Image (cartoon, grey):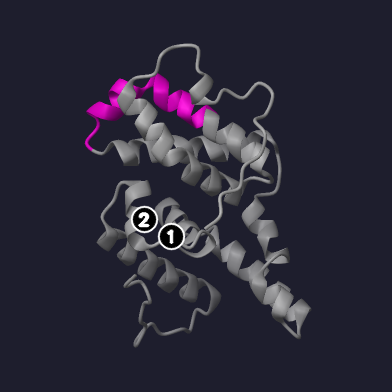
Amino acid sequence: MTEETTPQLPGAKPMDRHPHPLPLDFAAFHQMHRTGYVRYAKSFLHNWADAEEATDAAFERIYRQWSRVLASENHEAYAWQILRNQVHDHEKARRRRPLLDTAAFDTAALRETTDPIGQLTESLTLLRAFRELTDRQQDVMVLLHLHDLTPAEIADELGIAAATVRSTARYARLRLAAILDPGHTSKGHTDDLAR
């Protein structure tokens, strides 16, 4: 995977330029997770600048709550929830259509199809159905299919077990199949999540 970077937004507060000395454990957490957090935020927002702004705001909140994060049973999961909430607050504040809804217009399937209208309709239907998944199912599917992370990598980001990632992805696929084709039977369903 190649890393995309953009100049920092005016007014954004990257943690490496924070006015107070950062605790070493927080600085390490920030360094380890920021790139992945920005990529996740970009899945829901319209550009890298918005994604970086939302991510930096999330890290500022994580920093202010750092003692609570560390005291929690699972600090990765606690921090991830802060990020998720910040991204969706950012999305609402901008009053923009979620990027996942517009992603149907820029997919590999659409670029390669001989029936662009049919493929576009199918992609829009799938992405609308995607919104009916639980928060965790959405996160797992975004990281698995849009960012091509392995279940182990997703587990590290979300603070859950890799087996939970695989199970969540399986149930998300079954849920999508039920939404898209109510007569669909799940017998014989297999996963390709043994990565």
Whether tag 1 and tag 2 are in contact, CB under 8 A, the answer is: yes
- In percent of width and height, residue 9 lies at 67, 29
- In percent of width and height, residue 143 lies at 47, 57
Main SS category, magenta section = helix
Could you say which is closer to the camera, residue 177 or residue 36? 36
Figure label count: 2
Q: Is residue 123 above or below residue 188?
A: above
x 46%, y 83%: residue: 184
- In percent of width and height, residue 75 lies at 29, 36
x 53%, y 20%: residue: 17
As for residue 67 lying within the magenta part, the answer is yes
Q: In this rendering, does residue 79 appear at all? A: yes
Q: Is residue 103 above or below residue 188?
A: above
x 36%, y 32%: residue: 28
Could you say which is closer to the camera, residue 47 or residue 131? 47
Could you tell whether 4 is left or right of 187 in the image?
Answer: right
Q: In this rendering, does residue 91 appear at all? A: no
As for residue 52 lying within the magenta part, the answer is no
Q: Residues within 10 Å of mark 2 (few under 14, many from 20)?
A: some
Element at badge 1?
loop
In the picture of the structure, the residue carrying the numbered disc 2 is 153
User: Where on the picture, by quarter, is residue 106?
Assistant: bottom right
Q: Which residues are magenta?
A: 57-73
User: Where on the picture, by quarter, is residue 26?
Assistant: top left
x 55%, y 39%: residue: 87
Q: Identify residue type, mark 1.
A: Leu
Q: Identify residue type, mark 2.
A: Glu
In the picture of the structure, the residue carrying the numbered disc 1 is 149
- In percent of width and height, residue 182 lies at 50, 79
Q: Which mark is residue 177?
A: none
Q: Residues within 10 Å of mark 1 (few under 14, many from 20)?
A: some
Q: Is residue 180 above or below residue 43?
A: below
